[in-house]
Every structure is written in structure tokens, then in C-alpha cells.
Image (cartoon, rainbow, N blue to C red):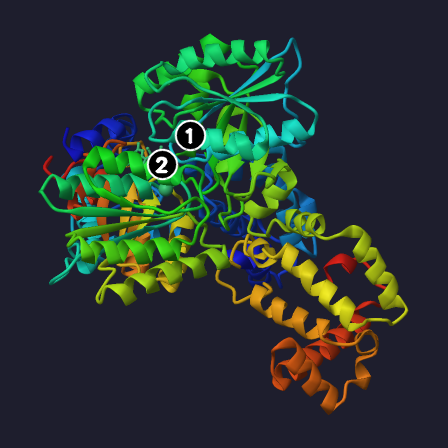
Amino acid sequence: MSLFQKLKQGLAKTSANIRSKIQSIFQPGALTDEFLDELEAVLIQADVGVEATTALIDSLREESRGKSFERVEDLYRAMAEKVAEIFATVDAPLQVADQGPTVYAMVGVNGSGKTTTIAKLAHRYTSQNKKVILAAADTFRAAAGDQLDVWARRTGADLVRHSHGSDPGAVAFDAARAAIARKADLLLVDTAGRLHTKKNLMEELKKIIRVISREIPGAPHEVLLVIDGTTGQNGLIQARVFAEAVPITGLCITKLDGSSKGGIAVAIAGELGIPVKLVGVGEQASDLRDFDARGFAYSLFGFDDSGY
Amino acid sequence: MAFEGLASRLADTFKKLRGRGKLSEKDISEGLREVRLALLEADVNFKVVKEFIGNVRARCLDAEVMESLTPAQQVVKIVHQELISLLGGKTHPLDISGPPPAVIALYGLQGSGKTTAAGKLALQLKKGGRKVLLVSCDVYRPAAQKQLEVVAEMAGVSFFTLSDKVSPEVIAKKGVEKAIESACNVVILDTAGRLQIDDEMMDEAQRINQASSPRERLLVVDAMTGQEACQVAQEFDRVVDITGVILTKLDSDARGGAALSIAKVTGKPIKFASLGEKLDDFQVFHPDRMASRILGMGDVLTLIEKAEAAFDQEKAAEMEEKLRRKQFTLEDFMEQMKEVKKMGSFGDLLRMIPGFARAQVDLDVDPKELARVEAIINSMTPEERQNPDIISGSRRRRIARGSGTTVQDVNRLLKQFYQARKMLFQMSGPDKRFGRLRFF
Ligand SMILES: Nc1nc2c(ncn2[C@@H]2O[C@H](COP(=O)(O)OP(=O)(O)O)[C@@H](O)[C@H]2O)c(=O)[nH]1
Ligand SMILES: [Mg+2]
């Protein structure tokens, strides 16, 4: 199933509602306040947030002054393209090392989907016959190492792990050494879930990243903040605080196979300039997609971008 | 900014509007716009906000508010009261009455915190004298069963599961049988995370219900959830008929408006608040505190309670007595530092208040620093500890040598001590309201 089929499936019910509501109030001609209110409602209900929504609506109002719209779809297109542009301006592909192992680290709050995203990335690259090593630097959560171990075996990646409760920095160190010694193409570092409000845990995270950069110059090539797609406005604070602690290079938005639309990514990209790089659409190793800004933007309104 | 809180924002709004005597209906609408924004920023569902504002508008248009000298406070009070009543008013205990074993099933989306909540609930019930069996019905997520097994061991309760080839409803059923066999009076079922739009998985949840007849069917919801909380809760409620909610990750600085959305659309009470990774970071849910938090006024009560819980009450009383007699020695100083360290995560607690996440509050005691202080004080004679004023230059050198530190370290410690003492004597005046918190 394609991402959009999946997204559409999840959105089928809600988007039907949105569409009929908007369709019913739409009159060809200039933008009305009533219509803008309706667009605002759609964006807020997609978790885009009041501030970003207001900015988007204001700018649409500005630009469409004196213009007239024939079809309701044209309005959506105008709005969706605006959202897509926010992502396009910060877009950047996943970085790869010029030589030696490429290193990606996953960070984020508890349960956002870090470990599963690692599994998905491992699957993607071992399928391309790349040598992948997983570092189990979540030594805190019960059975976190076992979870990664299962994924390592399923995807054919190597695993570096220490005992429960040991120093995650030491795991990162050993894994980095192993990646060099075994000439790995890719090292994926799993970290424990931590709330951005826990200062000592944020310090621990800094240390993990420091260890990696010391052992492998230029690494980590990506520090991906994994955000649950159902997250509301706290997502923006998470991104801000994590980015202050470690150099976040991109987002991975997970669980977009659910009914949430992940709109907080718009606010994060718009305000902090952090691009979205990956999207999680399920619990299986193959449920990972590269981020597609336009597709995402249109899906906020319950459309896929090929629809019009 | 969220952390200014609604109260001050409303005060600003009304200040602008006043000066013409009585507030008009339009003025109230202006004020309610602020309320609407605050609720949306807190992730309360868009439609729930709309209805809510409609309801409080009537109360705010009451002459009492419009003629009040403090309309902002009046509006906040009304909004606060309405929020509390929507959130269930009072606290709601768990129903584990009836013939044992009482079965409690936990349901929820992926990553909402079910397994940890299961462990916390188990520990709490165990402390209440129950014999608990934790059962893992999550046969999907790698190592989920193992995770619960470890959690059960940490909580000191029994654990049961079957191979991940066995269906979850069969595991649930066998789990209940196992509880009867081993005389456990509470069974907690941990289930796999599932999306409310995944029909197959929702059917499975229903089958688990049928197989185990849980008296409590609790929906576990992440406090950081956004607008979809309504849909999620509504659908889970429709399929498994939830009896209540556990709100998790409240140790974040999320305002937690999802709680209101869920209470509104399901009419089911929120029973517990989970706020930390330790198994005893688990509380009965307090609607009034949640209401303040949603409005950006901070969950200050929870904070104080946690601080108090970590604080040794007896020692605190002893300390108060000493302070009253203006006695504060280096030994007391060290005791204090240890207390602070025990509370250790006090800074973490403070950062639970919306807006404080990024505040540069440095309340944590560095363990290394504490070790140094301890070494220094241990190298002093009892007399020096009781009466630091006698610590001369030569004594400082001796202490530094003895503790493997430098004279600068000793000087710094003494300076800190004198500062602390001065502050404490000043603060131990007649107002004892914050007696237990004054060290911070
Ligand atoms: N439906 C869905 N579930 C996911 C997705 N990504 C992760 N999960 C689930 O979310 C839960 C938490 O994931 P995990 O990777 O353990 O989170 P971590 O704590 O951040 O490492 C697990 O049950 C995963 O199966 C996704 O894209 N879609
Ligand atoms: Mg993990």
C-alpha cells in the first residue's frame, strides 16, 4: 500500500466531513471570512497550532486579495502549496559520510517510535546489501535492548549492546569503534526515550552525541528527532529544547498510519527551520517513507496531491 | 507565551477595555477570545473549545462579572470551575470490588505508556495490600512481554504470559485462571498498542474483554496528545466501553488539554496521573490541578506534594527548630545538601510547569559537588563543624590536604555556607507557609 493510500484510508472519515462542510459553504468568488474560518478550523484540528495557522491564513488572505476562486479545490491548492513551501525551504536529504561509516542517532520522548524507526532504517539499508550496526544506547527502559535485538536479527544487522543500566555513552563508544573496525556502512544509534524537561537526561544525550563525534569525525551525520504524529503543541517545545541540547538535523514523524495528521511538523519546520526527513506509517520494518512535502501538505486537508 | 498563564493575559485584555466603567458584552467576547486561544494552545479539541466557550459565555455575561472591579479574575474563576466540573469534579477510585480476581485491562494507542502504567498500578495496589498478577497480552511488539516481566519484577508482583504464538484473548483468559490458582486478587492485563481505526485490532480488544470480563477497562493516553484525542477516546469507548482513563507523561510540560477533550466526549472519569519513569511516580488524578495546568497556571500543588514526599519530614521539623534557635552548623548544611540531592530531580519537577522547560533554573545538586563538600566537612574536627568561625587559614590548609581538595574549594564551601545560613535565618521568620520549601 502506498503512503497516500494509507494516509487516505486513515483520513477517509474525517476528510469526508471536512470536504462536505467546506463544499457547502463555498461560493465562487473572492475569499470570504467564513471560508477562512473553516480553513483555520481544518488546520488547527490537524495540530498545526494557532500561531502557525494564523500566519498561514493571514498570508493567504493577503495574497488572494482581488483574486477570485472558481472552485473550492483551488483554495485548497493555494493553502496546501503554502504549507508545502514551508517544508521545501528547509528541505535537505539524509546526509551520507564521504568515507567511513555513516551514523544516524534517534532521539525523542518516550514511546515516540525511535527503536521501531531504527528497525525500519536497518531494513531499508540491509535490503540494499549495506552493512548495518545497531547501537543499543537505551540501557534504561526494561527490555529495550531485547527489543532492538529482535529487530537486529530480523533485519540482518549487527547489534552492539551492554547490560541493562550501563552507561549509554560507553555503548556509543563501542559501537563507533565496531563500525570502523567492521567497516560498516551505517551505524544506527538508539537512545532511551527522555522528556525534554529532564535536564540530567538531556546532559546524558549530549554526552552520547559527543562520544560519537569524537570517535568518528563528521558523525553523527543525522540526529533525528522522532515525534509521534499524534503529538499536539508540546511537539514544538520538544523540538526547541532537543535542538538546544544536540544538533537536530531533521524530524521523523511516526504513526501517520493513524488518524492524526502530524500538523505540528508545520510549526516546527516553520519556526525552527527543522526539515522532516522520514515518515513512519506502521509497525513493520517496511513501513518507512521518505518525507514528501506536497503529499503531506495536501493530506492535512484530506486530499492527495495527485487528486487535482 | 503559555507560561504567562491565562490569568495575566486576561488581566491585560480587560485593562485595555476598562476605563469606561462597566464592561460590555463585546468586552467579554474579547476576553473569551483569550480563553479560546489558551485552550487551543493547550490542545483541547477545537470543537470541545467551541462548545465550552459557548457555555461559559452565559455565566460570564452575568452582571456580577461585568460590573466587577476584577473581571479577569472572575472570568478565570468561572473558566476554572467549569473545567473542573468537566474533568469530573472529584477524584474517582478504582473499582476492584466484587468476587476476586478483579480484572483491569489497559488499552491505548502505541507508545502511550501502557506497560509502565501497568507496573505502576500494580505497585500501588500491592502497597494497598492486594496480590497482583501482571499479564502481558502484547504478542506483537518485539520484547513487549519481556518488558512487562522485568517491570513486574521491579514492582515485586507476579507475572504471566504465554508464547507470542498464542492469541491475546487466550492469554487473558489463562491469566485470569492463573490468578485464581495462585490466589491473586487483582489481574492487570497489558495489551498491545493499537490504532482506533484498525478494525482488526479493535476487534481483538473486544475479544480480550469478552474473554476476561475486566471490571475496569482503562484507556491509557499520553498527555502530549493533540487534537485527535477525541476521536481516539470516542472509538475506544465505543468498542471496549472504557471505565476510565490513565493520563501519562504528565512530568512533561505539556498543558494536557487532551484530558478535557476525552472527559468531554466520553463522559468517563480520568482516574490516574502518571508522572515519571519511576514506578512510584503515580497518583490519583486531581481535576482541579489539571484545570490549572490546562490554563497554563502550573500544576503547583502536585509539585509541592512531590517535593514534600521526597523530603524527610522529621529532619525538616528538626531543622525548623534549629533555625528558630538560630543554630545552623556545617553538619546541617551537609544534611541539607543531601536532602536536596535526594529530591534531586526537583529541577525536573519545576520544569513540569508549562514554560519552565527552558528556564535556566539550576536547582539540581551536582553529585560530584556533593562528594567534594562531604569530603571537606569530614576532614574537619567536630568543633570546626559546630563553630565554623574558628576555621583559620592554617586550619583551611589542613582541611584541604585532608580532603584532597584545594584551599579555594574550602573557601568556596565556607562562603556558600555563610550565604545559606544568612538566607535561612532571614527566611525562618513567622511565615511558615513555605517552611518546607524554603531551601530552594
Ligand atoms: N502504528 C504505528 N505504530 C508505531 C509506529 N512507529 C512505532 N510504533 C509503535 O509505537 C510503540 C513505541 O515504539 P518504540 O519504537 O518502542 O518507541 P521508542 O520508545 O521511541 O523507542 C511500539 O508499539 C511501536 O510498534 C508507526 O509509524 N505506526
Ligand atoms: Mg526505544
Q: Which residue is mark 1?
A: B146
The tally of labels here is 2
Q: Is residue A216 left or right of residue B38?
A: left
Report x, y in % for residue B147. 44, 32
Where disc 2 sits, the SS reads helix
The C terminus of chain B lies in which quarter of the figure?
A: bottom right
Q: CA distance from mark 2 to mark 1?
A: 8 Å
Q: Is residue B120 above or below residue B199?
A: below
Frontmost residue, A123 versus B64: A123
Question: Assess mark 2: CB under 8 A from ligand 2?
Answer: no
Q: Residue at x 73, y 90 (%)?
A: B394
Report x, y in % for residue B84. 62, 37
Crowding near the residue tagged with mark 1, few <14, some 14–19, many ≥20 C-alpha atoms within 10 Å: some
Report x, y in % for residue B7. 60, 55
Frontmost residue, B422 versus A182: A182
Q: Residue at x 78, y 67 (%)?
A: B332
Q: Looking at numbered disc 2 in the image, what kind of residue is underneath it?
A: Asp
Check the residue under mark 2 and report the chain it is in: A
Check the residue under mark 1 and report the chain it is in: B
Q: Is residue A39 left or right of residue B368?
A: left
Report x, y in % for residue B32. 53, 47
Disc sitting over residue A146 in the figure: 2
